[in-house]
Image (spheres, helix red, strand yellow):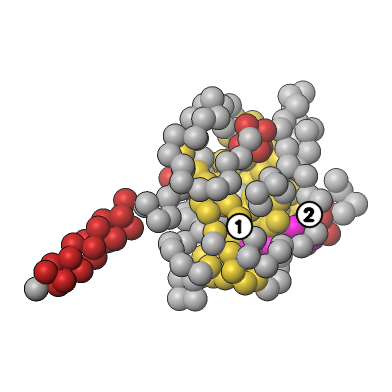
Amino acid sequence: MVGLVINIFLIAIISSSLTAGIFFNPFKIDKKCKVIINQEKIIPSCEVLDSVVIVKHPLGGWGSGFFISADGYLITNAHIAKKFMNSSMRGVVTIETRDHKAYRGKIIKIDHNEDLALIKINDIKTFSYLDLDKEIILKGERLLVLGYSHRELTGRDINHIYFSNKYLWEGVGTPGIWHGDSGGPIINKDEEVVGVGSAYLPKTRHTLYVPVKDVRNFIKGIK
């Protein structure tokens, strides 16, 4: 009887912990780059956090993206950018940075097969950006998805076990990509971009992503 009570008690603790996000806890970052809630092993620098942006739609939708150059080139998903390609918007995008400043950008290239879009902001400001030099993901490498789920900059750890060309297999836990994270960078502990987050497949618990080598091929000849 005592053993049964203890087991029930432990199950209750585990269930409440999962609900509270103890085992898979995204962290929010305040304006000073301090981690407010963090139980992950990867804590990005201010420069990395400042490179991640919101791609805002005037009707209320949004996605994420990140700068790949100081002069305003940024990457997001094609399924986000296509919403701006109608006759009225003509590829003009509103980009909001982490300090809540808004910029006007223009879609200059889009590839629906690779789910990538390249946007350019024409502004005199110099932006924080991420390099695309990483070649491969190491098996078992711990990864972090950065993006604006719920319109707040968050980071989510992926317990990465296996991978293929387009998928990251997650061992346990909740989705590595939530609504609003699409288009954001996936980085490793060395703050190297390994890919672009695209979607989550709940039935198989796979995170769909675009490998960084495909991003480099996509921007070749333009940036």
Please state which amino acid type lies under the numbered disc 1: Arg
What segment carries the magenta color? Answer: 209-214
Q: Quadrant of the N terminus?
A: bottom left
Q: CA distance from mark 2 to mark 1?
A: 14 Å
Instruction: Residue at 81% x, 51% y: name it.
Output: 133
2 vs 1, front mark: 1
Residue 211: horizontal and vertical position, in percent? 72, 62
- Residue 30's disc is none
Q: Quadrant of residue 70?
A: top right
Residue 26: horizontal and vertical position, in percent? 45, 48
Residue tagged 1: 142
Does residue 191 lie above or below 2 as drawn?
A: above
In the rendered structure, which disc, 2 or 1, sits on the residue that comes first in sequence?
2
Is 30 positioned to the left or the right of 125 in the image?
Answer: left
- Residue 134's disc is 2
Is 150 positioned to the left or the right of 31 in the image?
Answer: left
Please state which amino acid type lies under the numbered disc 2: Lys
